[in-house]
Amino acid sequence: MLYPYITLGDGTDILHSHIIEEDEMVKVEVHFERPLEDGFAVARCVLPTYEWIKKENYTEEDIKLFIKFLESNAPLIYKYARTGGISIA
């Protein structure tokens, strides 16, 4: 299951998984998705290794910006992944 985190000004939705315990590591998958005229741009990164397991229709410049975003947001993403997403009243 993916939980919504934020929508950027260009329409990119950022979602995250629950905590994944694998290979003695606590991981979270972060999903980026932006609608296009003929489909979607999609990218998925695994924290804490910053391994990109999917990159479709995003430029390397986009990915660099996403890495900067993740570096500053990783603690919050982990926090919300542990609690089942952001609680919105």
Image (cartoon, rainbow, N blue to C red):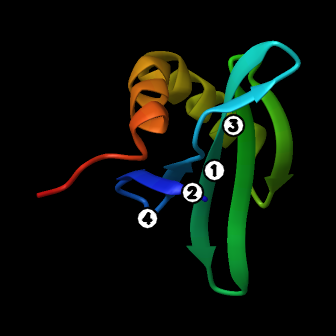
Cβ atoms at labels 1 and 4 below 8 Å apart: no
Identify whether 81 is placed above or below 22. Answer: below
Q: Please, what is the three-letter code of the amino acid marked with disc 4?
A: Gly
Residue to which mark 4 is pinned: 11
Q: Please, what is the three-letter code of the amino acid marked with disc 3?
A: Ile
- Mark toward the start of the polypeptide (2 vs 1): 2
Residue to which mark 2 is pinned: 2
Quarter of the rendering containing residue 29: top right
> Of circles 4 and 2, which is in front?
2
Q: CA distance from mark 3 to mark 4?
A: 15 Å
> Of circles 3 and 2, which is in front?
2
Task: Between residue 4 and residue 68, name the one nearer to us.
Answer: 4
Q: CA distance from mark 3 to mark 2?
A: 20 Å
Percent of width and height locating residue 70: 54, 26
Task: Between residue 63 and residue 45, name the one nearer to us.
Answer: 45
User: Could you classify mark 2 by the number of other residues whose Cα lies within 10 Å: few (under 14), some (14-19), or many (20 or more)?
Assistant: some
- Mark toward the start of the polypeptide (1 vs 4): 4
Q: Please, what is the three-letter code of the amino acid marked with disc 2?
A: Leu
- Mark toward the start of the polypeptide (3 vs 2): 2
User: Could you classify mark 4 by the number of other residues whose Cα lies within 10 Å: few (under 14), some (14-19), or many (20 or more)?
Assistant: few
- Mark toward the start of the polypeptide (3 vs 1): 1
Q: CA distance from mark 1 to mark 4?
A: 13 Å
Quarter of the rendering containing residue 47: top right
| In-image side of 53 versus 21 (left or right) | right
Percent of width and height locating residue 73: 43, 24
Local SS, label 2: loop
Task: Between residue 13 and residue 4, name the one nearer to us.
Answer: 4
Local SS, label 4: loop
Residue to which mark 3 is pinned: 63
Viewport quadrant of the N terminus = bottom right
Residue to which mark 1 is pinned: 31
